[in-house]
């Protein structure tokens, strides 16, 4: 393996302080490698090194120059470690000096993970501009809302200008239609000035289908395993060292050169690796080295469809050391409790009993038989703190994978939306919002692509229709290739000036404020939590404590008023009633109530009391 340098990027075209370019490409399949300057057609020969690496040093190429690699004199390909593409995944790369940006965020100190209130957004649909600069214009809004960490869906270069981001094929290149690498650096700096952390979604489990030229260079893929997206990336087969370095360097680049605070790694259960040191564990070891070198803090968050604590247990316990994971099971239990039909993966969830279990145990399935999977599933997460689990009532997947992309605002009542928001924000876990939910956005978030390969585009179109064939009585699946589908997914910021949207926004602000101000909600000690659910009345009560402070939460998911007993020993003071007139409701709640008294909870509402 080429020697990994923690302090600087080695792959691709990189510039020294003296203006010289250092070129390194991993191409063990090639017999000859040249760098071709697009405008002048000048060729720079690379010298073969051991383990399949090719290298050169030259002053001929400058930042801003377009170039590609010429393999064996005939295959002209973009740089696998390209930082910037001119227009497409098929065309030339643009030489970019990572060190040219003048950072001014030295006062930024990444927050404790426990303090994160996450907001997931898609760059292309978050604003009308659909750019990083567009996000910058909304930072004051995000601060007012109270979120302190934005999670940006993948920005790796993909075909065309419209994509969720999971079809990227150049993991180092920042999507040109979003503004490119310098615009992302500017956005991160602006976020840090505003006190907002930046989490970047990255995809290390597969490559997109169009413009994927990595296989021309080296053994990036293996036929040893399959994934839902084709051959798996090669993390443990012959020639895997170069592949491992490629992705480890990518992680380090985002942290070191773009000052990203955390990475969210997509579907890590689809990463196949039986090496003695799993790739995720090696990534963690290298990130620890980087943090020691720079003094900055970075987090690694995983999307994981396995209730397996090995991924999030510390290195010292032979875990992979990931800092946190998404918990889809909390979402599924909450959705079923709120009225979602129990089909597909929702069929495993009973509703309020499972929601109570998720509050208590994080995983719903931690050793029980899963009817949907037809097997015993999961392991108990007894010693993992609350900050290791991220919960939500909606996200890009759970909205966008519906045929019509309906958000919660289109599926449940206004009162139920408030209750679901409260259920997330009073949890002993890290809360995440999906862009627009805080003001009850009515536009859907649909699945969209802009593949330039017409056959592939048609295959995606047909596949989407086939996926929802059983639902065609409800209408046709929107065309994922159509620009209209993309535009229909954009946020409607003008809604914020109207009701009920303005009221919902104020309600979310209040919930987030309580989450920050009340130690019993803010401190994520899972041991200091009591939860009770009643299937018959569809009510759930939560008692959370921290030192001398206690918070009692009463939730009623039914459409009738229900009675709940308040915990003994305290005189409780009301701090939130989601059914109050100020939040668009008509019900009152006692301002104070004795412990052990009967509390009437309005339909589809959440009441929060403190002591």
Image (cartoon, helix red, strand yellow):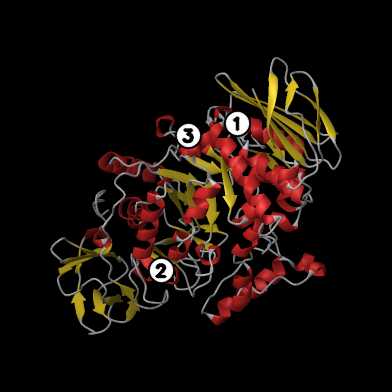
Residue 239 against residue 29 in the figure, above or below: above
Residue 457 versus residue 530: which sits nearer the camera? 530
* Picture mark count: 3
User: Element under label 3?
Assistant: loop
Q: Residue at x 22, y 85 (%)?
A: 40
In the rendered structure, find residue 380 and report the number of the disc placed on it.
1
In space, the residues marked 1 and 3 are separated at their CA atoms by 12 Å
Of all residues shown, which one is farthest toward the left?
A: 18
User: Element under label 2?
Assistant: loop
Q: State which quadrant residue 570 falls in.
A: top right
Residue 609 versus residue 89: which sits nearer the camera? 609
Q: From this viewpoint, is residue 117 visible?
A: yes
| Residue matched to label 2 | 179
Q: Residues within 10 Å of mark 2 (few under 14, many from 20)?
A: some
| Residue matched to label 3 | 313
Q: Residue at x 36, y 76 (%)?
A: 86
Residue 210 against residue 603 in the figure, above or below: below
In space, the residues marked 1 and 2 are separated at their CA atoms by 44 Å
Q: Residue at x 53, y 45 (%)?
A: 146
Q: Residues within 10 Å of mark 1 (few under 14, many from 20)?
A: some
In this rendering, position of residue 132 left or right of residue 405: left
Tell me the quadrant of the picture where the C terminus can be found.
top right
Asked if disc 1 and disc 2 are in contact, CB closer than 8 Å, the reply is no
In the rendered structure, find residue 420 and report the number of the disc placed on it.
none
């Amino acid at each position: 393996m080429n020697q990994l340098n923690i302090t600087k990027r080695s792959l691709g075209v990189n510039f020294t302080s003296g203006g010289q370019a250092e070129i390194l490409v991993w191409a063990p399949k090639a017999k000859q490698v040249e760098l071709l300057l697009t405008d002048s057609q000048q060729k720079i020969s690379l010298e073969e090194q051991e383990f399949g690496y090719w290298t050169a040093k030259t002053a001929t190429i400058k930042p801003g120059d377009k170039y590609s690699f010429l393999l064996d004199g005939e295959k002209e390909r973009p740089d696998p470690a390209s930082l910037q593409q001119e227009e497409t995944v098929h065309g030339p790369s643009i030489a970019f000096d990572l060190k040219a940006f003048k950072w001014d965020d030295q006062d930024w100190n990444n927050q404790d993970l426990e303090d994160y209130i996450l907001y997931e957004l898609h760059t292309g649909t978050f604003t009308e501009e659909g750019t990083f600069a567009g996000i910058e214009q909304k930072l004051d809004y995000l601060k007012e809302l109270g979120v302190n960490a934005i999670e940006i869906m993948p920005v790796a270069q993909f075909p065309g200008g419209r994509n969720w981001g999971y079809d990227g094929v150049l993991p180092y290149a920042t999507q040109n239609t979003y503004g490119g690498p310098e615009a992302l650096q500017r956005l991160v700096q602006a976020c840090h000035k505003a006190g907002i952390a930046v989490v970047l979604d990255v995809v290390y489990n597969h490559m997109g289908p169009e413009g994927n030229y990595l296989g021309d260079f080296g053994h990036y893929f293996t036929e040893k395993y399959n994934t839902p997206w084709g051959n798996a990336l090669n993390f443990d087969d012959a020639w895997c060292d170069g592949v491992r370095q490629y992705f480890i360097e990518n992680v380090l680049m985002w942290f070191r050169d773009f000052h990203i605070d955390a990475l969210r790694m997509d579907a890590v259960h689809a990463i196949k690796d039986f090496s003695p040191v799993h790739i995720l564990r090696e990534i963690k070891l290298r990130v620890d080295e980087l943090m020691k070198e720079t003094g900055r803090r970075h987090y690694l968050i995983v999307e994981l469809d396995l209730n397996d604590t090995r991924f999030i247990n510390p290195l010292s316990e032979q875990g992979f050391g990931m800092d946190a994971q998404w918990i889809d099971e909390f979402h599924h239990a909450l959705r079923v409790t709120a009225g979602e039909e129990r089909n597909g993966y929702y069929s495993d969830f009973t509703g309020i009993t499972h929601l109570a279990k998720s509050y208590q145990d994080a995983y719903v399935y931690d050793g029980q038989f899963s009817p949907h999977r037809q097997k015993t599933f999961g392991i108990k997460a007894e010693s993992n703190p609350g900050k290791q689990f991220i919960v939500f009532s909606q996200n890009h997947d759970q909205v966008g994978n519906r045929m019509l992309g309906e958000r919660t605002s289109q599926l449940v009542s206004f009162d139920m939306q408030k209750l679901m928001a409260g259920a997330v924000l009073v949890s002993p876990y890290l809360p995440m919002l999906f862009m627009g939910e805080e003001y009850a956005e009515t536009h859907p978030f649909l699945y969209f692509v802009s593949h330039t390969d017409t056959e592939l585009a048609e295959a995606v179109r047909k596949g989407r229709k086939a996926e929802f064939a059983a639902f065609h009585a409800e209408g046709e699946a929107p065309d994922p290739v159509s620009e209209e589908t993309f535009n229909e997914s954009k946020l409607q910021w003008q809604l914020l000036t109207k009701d009920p949207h303005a009221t919902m926004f104020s309600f979310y602000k209040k919930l987030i404020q309580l989450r920050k101000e009340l130690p019993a909600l803010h401190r994520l000690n899972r041991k200091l939590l009591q939860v009770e659910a009643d299937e018959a009345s569809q009510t759930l009560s939560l008692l959370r404590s921290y030192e001398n402070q206690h918070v009692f939460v009463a939730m009623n998911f039914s459409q009738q008023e229900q009675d709940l007993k308040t915990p003994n020993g305290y005189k409780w003071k009301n701090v939130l009633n989601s059914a109050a007139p100020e939040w668009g409701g008509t019900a009152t709640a006692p301002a104070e109530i004795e412990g052990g008294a009967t509390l009437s909870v309005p339909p589809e509402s959440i009441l929060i009391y403190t002591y």
